Image (tube, coloured by chain):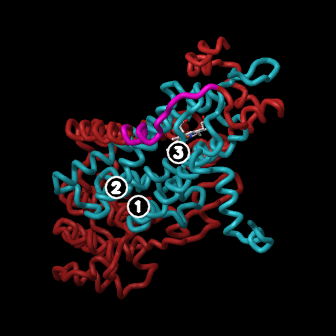
Amino acid sequence: MSTGIEKEMWTTKLRKGWQKNLPVEKLLPDTQPAYVASWIYMFGVATLASLGVIIASGLWLSFEGASWYHFSSVGHFVNSIHFWAVQFFFIFMVVHLWGKFWMAAWRGKRMMTWVTGALAFVGSIATAFTGYLIQTNFDSQWISYEAKDGFNSVGIGSKFTVTNFGQMILLHVAFLPVIIGVITLIHVLLVRSKGVVPPIDAFNKELGERK
Amino acid sequence: MSDRRTELEAAPWGGRTRRYDLIKEGVVAVVIIAILAAVLSTLFGSPDDKQITFKDWATAAPADFYATSVQELAGTSGTAGYGAPYNTASDGVNLGPLHLAKIMGVTHPVDTVNDFVITPLTTVSNAAPVADALKLWQASDAKQQSTWATNYDTALTKANQDASKVPTGDYGPVPELAAGLLTMAQAGSLDGALLSQGNYFQSDNTKQTLFLGDGSYFNDQSTASNLQGDTWGMMNETGRYPGQAWLWLYSFWYQIPPFNNGDSHPFGANADAWIMVIMGALSLGLIIMPLIPGVRSLPYKIKIHRLIWKNYYQEENL
Ligand code: HEM
């Protein structure tokens, strides 16, 4: 039914590309290949779930303000949830990373899945770091004092000022999580779109497909 | 890898499948992790060592605070001699011929004399000797001010920071100014004055943090908490809590030669910059790892994948 005009439209192109690469059956399938049966597959989901808990507890902390948790016991509890969820997040992400490495999970045109994952890793470290700077306690005083030298040494400190609380809090709650969120979203959509990578030995010598 | 193989690996899976409920898995994961986090939070809480204020510092270590104030006036403190982005007192660290901080310029001007001492003193009503000292200082030229401050700084250092042991000399109003700042800090009014610098809204703590770091008190507290960079402090947390363990590799470089020796040139003295470069390169390496020959072949040589997909390989006799 498409006319020549539709073909030119960006909207049409987006819809068609989307339908081709990520139809909803692929996004939310009922089945997975038989080889998706290993404990290692839990770690991507566990990382994602930890991120969910981090964001939820972080939003709560944002609404109450940066100093809330020093004097409220509820605040201290929510801060603790945020703190421990971050520890989980990194543990799971690192196991996930090593898992994907030993599975050579970038095979079969999945390079961008690896790249977005690695970007999420580096970005998460930056985000966590800014989090440590806005604890408004002795630890954040010390970390900002020490870290300034690293950033200053290569000129980054002229724009990214770790001793500037206002800048750090804005980056931690706005800019960086949005970036991590977007990168993670792309990462997960890529996995859904490409399907889970087959095992390294899934194909026999003649490269015939195994059932 | 051959193109044929890549095509097969990229193609939609045509083999056996199994039921798999992604959404259920995700929801269960969130619930479990929320519960785990709640349990740990209840058992252990989270670290929160109280911030150090100038009042704390001036009360607990008055001699250190007093001497640091004199250094700020004399221009001998760490901040006064730092260079970019705070001032032009030095070239800062370098990467060989590249002085990146200097190139980026003074983006956060900090004038230790006025920002740390004189301006804060003008925001309170001082006792007569301090008020007179302030008047005398402000009426004198820079050269005179510097002579007084340097004389007193040198004498105080010689007297091991004990002001009562400093012989009389040509110090002008400097001792009174430092004493005035000490009184102000002990009363708790320096924190706010350093931050606001005469403004209403303020969210940049750079000046406070730099001043705090110029003294020994702050550093001693951090040593006591094992937070110093040369003892893996970057990954540590106050109290008995896990810190930023993921910074282990970054922290690692500070523990080994030449980077652990601040006096060795060119690398040790510029460790901050070189380690930043190394970590930048390694991060980039991680991101493009699938393109790096050798590293990307490891999973084929060290066959951990046989373990990961053990069940599948068994079922399929592979
Ligand atoms: C914010 C952090 C991250 C989240 C939330 C996340 C989430 C996920 C999820 C849910 C999956 C699918 C399930 C699975 O295979 O485990 C996945 C797959 C994958 N992840 Fe991550 N990931 C993150 C970081 C990383 C990192 C740091 C890397 C490696 C540098 C990475 C590389 C991969 C690869 C290559 C796949 C595809 C696996 C396949 O096709 O079988 N991810 N990720």
Chain-order first, disc 3 or disc 2: 3
Place of residue B240 in the rendered image (x, y in percent of width and height, measured from the top left)? 28, 36
A81 vs B155, nearest the viewer: A81
B178 vs A106, nearest the viewer: A106
Q: Nearer the viewer, mark 3 or mark 2?
A: 3
Q: Spatial distance from mark 3 to mark 2, Cα to Cα?
A: 28 Å
Q: Identify the magenta region.
A: B16-28
Residue A28: assigned label: 3
Tag 2 and tag 1, C-beta contact below 8 Å: yes
Quadrant of the rendering where the N terminus of chain B is positioned:
top right
Residue A173: assigned label: 1
Colour used to depict chain A in the structure image:
cyan
The image quadrant that residue B164 belongs to is bottom left
The image quadrant that residue A68 belongs to is bottom left
B285 vs B232, nearest the viewer: B285
Residue A58: assigned label: 2
Place of residue B171 in the rendered image (x, y in percent of width and height, measured from the top left)? 33, 72
Q: Residues within 10 Å of mark 2 (few under 14, many from 20)?
A: some
Give the amino acid at mark 3: Leu
The chain letter under disc 2 is: A
Whereabouts is ligand 1, in terms of quadrant? top right
Q: Spatial distance from mark 1 to mark 3, Cα to Cα?
A: 30 Å
Q: Residues within 10 Å of mark 3 (few under 14, many from 20)?
A: few
Residue depicted at x 16% and y 69%: B187
Does B258 sit above or below residue B76?
Answer: above
Q: Is residue A112 left or right of residue A145?
A: right
Give the amino acid at mark 1: Val
